[in-house]
Amino acid sequence: MKVSVSAPGKLMLFGEHAVVYGYPSVVTAVDKRLYVEAEQTDKEVEEVITPQVKESRFVSESISFFREKFAVKEHVKVRTRGDFSHNVGLGSSSAATVAVLAALGVLFNKFFKKRTLFDMSYQVNIKIQGVGSGFDVAAATFGGTLYFIRQGEVLEPLSVGALPLVIGYSGIKADTPSYVRKVAENFKQKKNETIDIFKKIRDLVELAKQSLLVKDYEMVGKLMTRNHVLLQQLGVSTVKLDSMIDAAFNTGAFGAKLSGAGGGDCMIALVPSEKRKNVEKAIEKAGGQVIKVKNNAEGVKIEERII
């Protein structure tokens, strides 16, 4: 049997970094997907083909985890391809982990629920990165838009539909683990100050959740901008991201913020339809690259099964 499985990338809408410490977040899956083809092989070793170089270890570790957990002796050939470059910070590594484990489950008739798939994928990512809350794994597994608390303590789907987002890539690949560790160091040195920021982010997340559900985009935009200011206070933004965010806001966006760990990768802006082109041009003028994606995408799914 050969099986093809895909999983979506993600955008963090609210709650970066605070989510690592048990505070809530809102994450949405995007329509850029990572595809995995898997089949059994007669060879004595795994064959892993990953044009997206960063995903190679996530694929290999996922295979090793699956073989050990389910006592699988047969070897496999796994090939990946993606709708997006891993460089843009849309969570391709987590998508690869989820898709590989799901594909192997189908290949070896190990049927498990999505919650189990999430838990396994989270374990693999923690083994590799050492840190993380699992929000990107949750988006890849369940899809849609989620109200999420660390390790899946809360996984609440939100009926928000498609959002009028503009995404700008800074051109700089962020090192997520290093920025998570940077915040952890700040937490040790300035614990009370950092907790205060996390609590303010938590309050924004709760307001954003309600505003998203009633499609009050003007309020959602204001909350985005306030969230970004708090991320600046955590020291995870950059001059480039700030200039792209300012450019979006100054040309009519409801609001804007960085999305993810910071230090690079993407910013997002919530934009009225009549202002979209102006905002996109402004982001490009500020040195960003506009990435065409839609949110609220479907979670992991089987694309094809060939017997």
Image: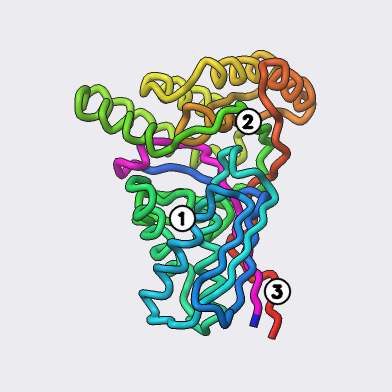
Q: Residue 132: within the magenta?
A: no
Pointer 1 residue: 156
Which residue corresponds to the image point at 51% horizontal and 60% vertical from the top-left? 59
Q: Which residue is mark 3?
A: 304
- Residue 140: x %, y % from top left: 54, 56
Q: Which residue is mark 2?
A: 169
Mark pair 1, 2: CA separation: 28 Å
Q: Nearer the viewer, mark 1 or mark 3?
A: 3
The kind of secondary structure element at disc 3 is strand
Up-down: is 179 above or below 51? above
| Residue 45 placement (x, y as % from top left) | 50, 73
The part of the chain drawn in magenta is: 2-23
Q: Secondary structure at mark 2?
A: strand
Where does the C terminus fall, quadrant-wise?
Answer: bottom right
Query: For this rendering, which residue is in front, 151 or 100?
Result: 100
* Of the image marks 3 and 2, the number of the one nearer the N terminus: 2
Q: Amino acid at mark 3?
A: Glu
1 vs 206: above or below:
below
Taking 122 as reference, is 1 above or below it? below
Q: Secondary structure at mark 1?
A: strand
Q: Position of residue 81 (x, y in %)?
A: 67, 56
